[in-house]
Amino acid sequence: MNAAPTTAPVEHTDTAGRPLPLIAVTMGDGAGIGPEVIVPALLHADTARRCRPVVIGDAERLRRAAAILGIGCEIVPVESPAEAEFGPGRINVVDLGLLPADLPWGQLSAVAGDAAYQYVRVAAELAVSGEVQGICTAPLNKEALHAGGHLFPGHTELLAHLTGVEEVSMMLSTPKVKVIHVTTHIGLIDAVNRIEPGLVERTVRRGHEAMVRAGVEEPVIGVCGINPHAGENGLFGYGEEEEKIVPAVEILRADGIDAVGPLPADTAFFLASRGDYDLIVAMYHDQGHGPVKVMGIEAGVNLTVGLPVIRTSVDHGTAFDIAGTGRAEAGSMVEALRQAAEMSTTPAR
C-alpha cells in the first residue's frame, strides 16, 4: 500500500520547540520510480512530524507522478530550502527544470542520468553550506548516470566527491539487521587487497558513531571475516583475518568499543537478526548486501556515514519495469526520511 498523505495541520518544531531538520530530497532518475515514491512519502503524516523535506528535482515530473497516483497536492517551486513553507498537501521543490516533458517512464536516458547527478550536486552544495541538515536520495540508475557523463559507481562515491570527503562508509539498515561495509563497489579481488587494519578500524568507528546517534548508547558490533568460517584458524585463505582484521578489533576493544570478530559471515547475520549484534561489519559488497536484501529490502534504508551531513536512501533501484504505473511502494522512502530526520540533529562526523 502506498503511504497516505496527511490532511491535519502539523507543528514544524520538535518537543523542545526547535525547528525540525531541513532535509534535501533528491529526485533520482526521473525515468524511474523516484517521483512516484517521493510524492506520497513527503505527504505522509510521519514525515511531516519529523522533518521539513525539500525536493531537489523537477516540479513538472513530480506533478505527473502525483497525477499517476491520483494524489491531489500542491507542488511549489522554491529558490532555496529557506524559502520553503510547509503545510498539509504541499510539496516544496528546488526546480532545476532539466527533464523534457516527453521523457518516457522506464527507459534508460542520458538526459535523466545527467539530471540525477545535478540534483545530487545541488543537495551536496546545500549540505556543505549548512542550508540543510540531511540528504535523502531517491534511486538513480548507474548506467544512465554514466551515459550522462558522470562516471561514479553510485551515490556513496558521488557524494564523497562532491563534499570533498576522502572516505565514507555505506550502511544498510532494516528492521532486523544493520550492516556497514568496509568496501563496496569494487571487484572481489580488489576488495580483499584494499582491506587493511586501518580501514577496518575507521569503518567500525563510523558505524559505532552512527549507532550512537541513532540512540544505541553502547552498540555491540559483529565484524565479519573475509574467508569462509572466518578462515578457521588458517584452514581457508592465507591468514587474511589475522593480518587485516584482528589488529583493528584489538585496538577498538582497547578503546571501549564492543567489537567482536572476526566472525563467520554465514552465521553473523543470523545472530544479528535475533538480536545478538546491533551492527554487522561486512568486508565487501555482496557479503553485506545479500543477507540484508533477503531479510528486509522492502523496509531497507541505505545510509552514507562520514559526510558533513547524514545521507539516507531507499534500498531499492529505479524499477524501470514498473515506473509510471503507480505501483511503486513508498514505505521505504518514508523510512529513509525518518532515519534522515533522526540522525540529522547534529552534523555527522
Image (cartoon, rainbow, N blue to C red):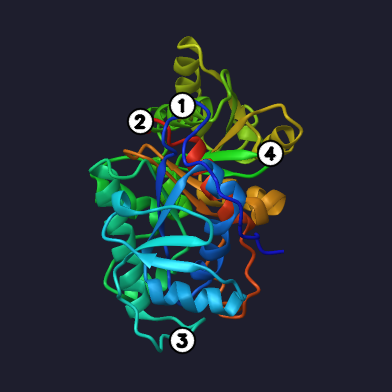
Residue 209: mark in rendering:
1
Identify the residue at horizontal 61%, vertical 75% (top origin).
Answer: 69
Looking at this view, is 23 or 183 the one in front? 23
Give SS at disc 2: loop
Q: Are marks 1 and 3 in contact (CB under 8 Å)?
A: no
Marks 2 & 1, CB-CB < 8 Å contact: yes
Instruction: Please state the horizontal and vertical placement of residue 145, each as a whole percent of the image.
Output: 35, 70
The amino acid type found where label 1 is placed reads Glu
Q: For the residue labelled by badge 1, is the local secondary structure a helix, a strand or a loop?
A: helix
Work out whether residue 151 can be spotted: no
Residue denoted by label 3: 104
Q: Nearer the viewer, residue 100 or 276?
A: 100
Q: CA distance from mark 2 to mark 3?
A: 40 Å
Q: Between marks 2 and 4, how big is the CA–CA gap?
A: 27 Å
How far apart are the two marked residues, 1 and 3, measured between alpha carbons? 42 Å
Q: CA distance from mark 2 to mark 1?
A: 8 Å
What secondary structure is marked by label 4? helix
Q: Earlier in the sequence, mark 4 or mark 3?
A: 3
Labels 1 and 3: the sequence-earlier one: 3
Q: Residues within 10 Å of mark 3 (few under 14, many from 20)?
A: some
Which residue position is annotated with label 2?
349
Residue topped by disc 4: 269
Q: Quadrant of the C terminus?
A: top left
The three-letter code of the residue at mark 3 reads: Pro
Q: Nearer the viewer, mark 4 or mark 1?
A: 1
Position in image of residue 32 (x %, y %): 50, 74
